[in-house]
Image: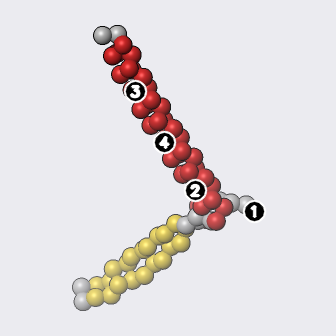
Amino acid sequence: MNEDPTDNYIKFGFTIKGQSGDLGASVIGDYLTHRELSILEQERVHYFSERDNIKSEIAKNAKNKAKSEELNK
């Protein structure tokens, strides 16, 4: 399967006619394939997992720092 990043959009063009003339309008919407959505979900899960790990490490380090500062008093 040959994938081209410029092929994942849909463009709708239409003309709105009124008393003061015609107005041309376009609506463009992009989309992802199922495979691309799966990759995006994996990246999302990985990101939040890493973020939670980092937050835990920061909390752990802050707790250890507070303990060591109390011991040094």
Q: How far apart are marks 1 and 4 (CA)?
A: 37 Å
- Sequence-wise, the earlier of marks 3 and 1 is 1
- Sequence-wise, the earlier of marks 2 and 1 is 1
Image coordinates for residue 32, horizontal then vertical, percent: 58, 64
Q: Nearer the viewer, residue 37 or 17?
A: 37
Image coordinates for residue 71, horizontal then vertical, percent: 36, 13
Q: Which amino acid does label 3 sit on?
A: Lys
Q: Nearer the viewer, residue 53 or 66?
A: 66
Q: Which amino acid does label 4 sit on?
A: Asp
Q: Mark number for residue 63?
A: 3
Q: What residue type is labelled 2?
A: Glu
Q: Mark number for residue 41?
A: 2
Residue denoted by label 1? 1
- SS for dot 1: loop
Residue sitting at x 34%, y 10%: 72
Q: Are marks 2 and 1 in contact (CB under 8 Å)?
A: no
Q: Mark number for residue 52?
A: 4
Nearer to us: label 2 or label 3: 3
Q: Mark number for residue 26?
A: none
- Crowding at dot 2, Cα within 10 Å, few <14 / some 14-19 / many 20+, comes out as few
- Location of residue 6 by image quarter: bottom right
Q: Distance between the residues labelled 3 and 1?
A: 52 Å
- Sequence-wise, the earlier of marks 2 and 4 is 2
- SS for dot 2: helix
- Crowding at dot 1, Cα within 10 Å, few <14 / some 14-19 / many 20+, comes out as few
Nearer to us: label 4 or label 3: 3
Residue sitting at x 57%, y 46%: 46
Q: In this view, does 50 lie above or below 41?
A: above
Q: Which amino acid does label 1 sit on?
A: Met
Colour mapping: secondary structure
Q: Distance between the residues labelled 4 and 3?
A: 16 Å
